[in-house]
């Protein structure tokens, strides 16, 4: 399955799907190494399918506002 052939669900972009699927694939790879079990197919394909089917929970963190630094020009 190619990412370019995917139609992302409403409100999601292909970039978002790819990023979340990559993180899920890393998690699944780690799980496979630790448990010794196998997955039906390639890890990246399984991860991408799980993301498309909304089986992977994810959220966005709110960015804390950085304190504005008062930078004043100096004359020399």
Image (tube, rainbow, N blue to C red):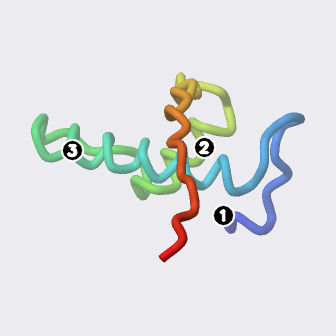
Dot 1 or dot 3, earlier in sequence: 1
Nearest the camera: 41 or 3?
Answer: 3
Which quadrant of the rendered structure holds the N terminus?
Answer: bottom right
Give the labeled residue for mark 2.
49
Circle 1: is it few (<14), some (14-19), or many (20+) Cα within 10 Å?
Answer: few
Decide: marks 2, 1 in contact (CB < 8 A)?
yes
Circle 2: is it few (<14), some (14-19), or many (20+) Cα within 10 Å?
Answer: some
> Can you say whether 73 is above or below 75 in the image?
above
Q: CA distance from mark 1 to mark 3?
A: 22 Å
In terms of secondary structure, where does tag 3 sit?
helix
Side (left or right) of 2 relative to 24: right
Q: Position of residue 68 (x, y in %)?
A: 55, 37
In terms of secondary structure, where does tag 1 sit?
loop
Dot 3 or dot 2, earlier in sequence: 3
Give the labeled residue for mark 3.
30
Q: Quadrant of residue 58?
A: top right
Identify which residue is drawn at 79% across, 57% down: 6
Dot 2 or dot 1, earlier in sequence: 1
Asked if one can make out residue 56 in the rendered structure from this viewpoint, the answer is no
């Amino acid at each position: 399955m190619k990412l370019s052939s995917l139609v992302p669900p409403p409100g999601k972009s292909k970039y978002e799907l790819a990023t979340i699927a990559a993180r899920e694939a890393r998690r699944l790879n780690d799980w496979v190494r630790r448990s010794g079990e196998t997955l039906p197919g390639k890890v990246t394909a399984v991860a991408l399918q799980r993301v498309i089917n909304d089986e992977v929970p994810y959220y966005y963190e709110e960015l804390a506002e950085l304190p504005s630094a008062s930078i004043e020009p100096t004359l020399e």
